[in-house]
Image: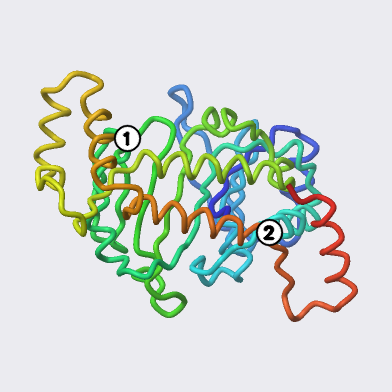
Amino acid sequence: MIDFIKIKITDEALISEVWNNNLLIYEGKSEKRFDDELKELITKSYKNLYFTKFNNRLEIKGSLHYYFNAGIHNADDFYIADCIDTIIEIETIFNLDLNKCYLINLEYGVNINPKFLVSDLILNIIYHEKRPFNRPKKFDYKIAGNEAYKQVKAYNKSVQFPDHCNNTFRFEVKTKQAKFIQSLGLYTLQNLTEFKYYNVLIKSLLNEWDSVLVFDKSKEIDVKFFNTNFWEDILQNGNRNKFNNQKKLYYKKLGTDNLHTNIKKIIERKTKYLKCVHIPTTINLETAQLKIQFFEHNKP
């Protein structure tokens, strides 16, 4: 469920501990302007994680999902238990104090496999809140208009990784400010080792999907609702509430069995599935039993 993360460490002792780890590989130097002064930055890496040292902090960024899959892809299901195990593994390798690893950016979402073509779905996802989705060609991405604190993405994952998944729809939230993460009650990497915070992320993901406008052209209703000019005109000339009122009317006319609602149900089922304990076949029975006991005791 968790993909990209970016954290910062400001504790000097912990910075020294991590930065001097022999597993880190030197990547290079760069310059960045701070308060009209150029500062030199040094970057090291471990697997697909990148460590950048500033004057007063260390930033670590990368995809936990890629890390779990040996840097190959993030097209499969990433169980919450596996995500927690990945964080604990990184904690152990670098002797991290997770309570001192502050979350800056976070990307969370799900991959689902609907019975209809994802390529068709992508064409009919039009708005998030009152922002039209952009349509870059790469990977058939559809990214919501840039907000100050987050992006909402909806795209065809199977175009990105055709060898690893088929007809796969990805819906995710990418934060751009720590302020938004904190509004969800998450502050440090330690929070991402606790099941209850994943329930918060799931709720957030579903709330963002509720704000998406999808054209369901299988329904026989007034064709104006499937015309982007109709919605653009409302935004430009209507009062502040007209867009949301028309959106509610549109979904009411579609009825309860509609494309938007069905996708939400699939997302809900997938998130429940990702809460299950995933026991890889390569680990021994004793380890598996310990995992089961731990997650049964700590499950939400």
- Horizontally, residue 175 falls left or right of residue 66, namely left
Which structural element holds mark 2? loop
Q: Up-down: is 1 above or below 57?
A: below
Q: Residue at x 28, y 42 (%)?
A: 251
Quadrant for residue 13, please give it: top right
Q: Residue furthest top?
A: 239
Crowd rating for badge 1 (residues with CA inside 10 Å; few <14, some 14–19, many 20+): some
- Horizontally, residue 219 falls left or right of residue 159, namely left
Tell me the amino acid under the disc marked 2: Leu
Q: Up-down: is 95 above or below 24?
A: above
Rendering coords of residue 141 (x, y %): 31, 57
Crowd rating for badge 2 (residues with CA inside 10 Å; few <14, some 14–19, many 20+): some
Q: Which mark is residue 44?
A: none
**Pick the front one: 170 or 293:** 293
Q: Up-down: is 114 above or below 34?
A: below
Which structural element holds mark 1? loop
**Pick the front one: 291 or 213:** 213
Q: Which mark is residue 24?
A: 2
Rendering coords of residue 100 (x, y %): 74, 36
**Pick the front one: 32 or 209:** 209
Indicate the quadrant containing the N terminus: top left, top right, bottom left or bottom right. Answer: bottom right
Rendering coords of residue 190 (x, y %): 74, 42
**Pick the front one: 167 or 7:** 167
Quadrant for residue 295, please give it: bottom right
Q: Residue at x 20, y 55 (%)?
A: 219
Rendering coords of residue 188 (x, y %): 69, 37
Tell me the amino acid under the disc marked 1: Glu
Residue pointed to by mark 1: 129
